[in-house]
Amino acid sequence: MHSGEEQSELLYETEALLNNQTPDSGLPKYGTQQIPNAAAAQLAPGFAPALILPIPFLAAVGVAATAATTVFAYAFLLCKDPTKCRSHEQTAYATTVAAASLIGNISALAILGPMEKLVAKHRKSGLVLWLIFRSMSVVVLAFGVSIRSIIVAVSGRVFQGLASDNMLHFALNTIYVQTPDARQLGKLIGASLALYMVGISVSPAIASFLPDFSASFAMALIVFLMAFLYLVFGIQTAGTKDPKTSVTAEAGMPESDSSLMKRMRSILQTISSPLSLFAARPILSFSGFSLFFYTSAQSYLFPAMMVDTSIRFGFDGAQNGYMISLAHAMASVMVDQTEAFLLRIKVET
């Protein structure tokens, strides 16, 4: 939890990053009551950032519904009996899961820069695009299973990487910072994380009761459709018209110059734009590398566990779903208790 001053600083720095400015560029800072930031000025009439809160829950339910069944789908396509893969099939299975995770991680790195520019123009567009990409990952996976093509099934990880969990929270936070009261920012982010943790805890267990592992794909698509309809038709936000935040990929280039080399350079600059923060504040590189290696390791942890349980104990998608639900439930309890413990320490001191 953050104090009022810390929340003001967090809101200020987030806005600076979204507007392609360094946080210590001499911009004025404000108190904790009403912060006249650029994002707050973009609020549509009657819009409140709290209206977004159903989205993290629905997104988590859709994501976690296929968490176990995606890995089981690879076994289904590679092994004669997906619960009893033979030795040569086990090698192909484990290699495929690792390669799929790598593809997703690379896609996740590539989308951050373009997503940053997109949400600077319209905050809600990041969530809309996330829902489309995540739905496409399920569609491609289901299509690969239906035609029994492991290559097609694994290619769905490209879309899954473009709509990673971290990208979801990034898109959500760009909307939460639109609240004009900085004291509400921490509460919104905390509530969003809580709803997300509930969703990923219960969804795999619910999906395990479905008659077939492929039914989880339909469950995920239905949930994503519900979130999409609610977001598009139930929530109105205003886009930004500020030319300072609407930086085009061709900035600084003559309009008549459309050479392939400059276009490629522009694309690379957009993809690598998040690294500009580390160039402006090198001290953050240590935290950045730490988070990078942690996220990389964590992204392989659950797939490796599910491969191991499938090979060693013959787990199917339903049984792996129970395991994931238990792990996420314990993580949710840990986060809640840690927050309560830190709050108690803060009160006592």
Image: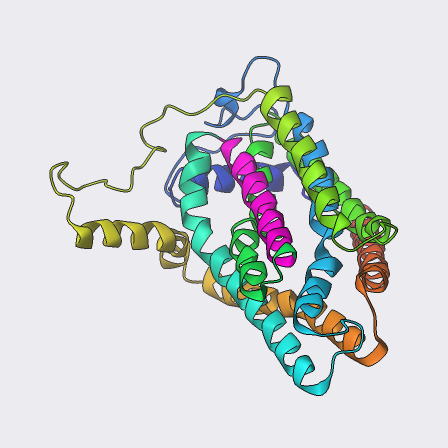
**Image position of 138 (left or right of 192):** left
In this rendered view, identify the residue nearer to me: 207 or 151. 151
Residue 174 appears in the picture as rendered: no
Q: Position of residue 194 (x, y in %)?
A: 77, 44
Residue drawn 76% across and 41% down? 195
**Image position of 173 (left or right of 206):** left
Scheme of colours in the image: rainbow
| Residue furthest right in the image | 209
Q: Quadrant of residue 110?
A: bottom left
In the rendered image, the quadrant that contains the N terminus is top right
Residue drawn 85% across and 53% down? 205
- Asked if 309 appears above or below 267 in the picture, the reply is below
Membership of 21 in magenta stretch: no
Q: Position of residue 63 (x, y in %)?
A: 69, 49
Residue 264 appears in the picture as rendered: yes
**Image position of 31 (left or right of 298):** left
Membership of 143 in magenta stretch: yes
Characterize the magenta stretch by its predominant secondary structure. helix
Residue drawn 72% across and 43% down? 218
- Asked if 298 appears above or below 89 in the picture, the reply is above
Q: Position of residue 88 (x, y in %)?
A: 66, 85
Q: Quadrant of residue 305?
A: bottom right
**Image position of 256 (left or right of 233):** left
Residue numbers of the magenta segment:
123-145
Residue drawn 54% across and 22% down? 237
| Residue furthest front in the image | 147
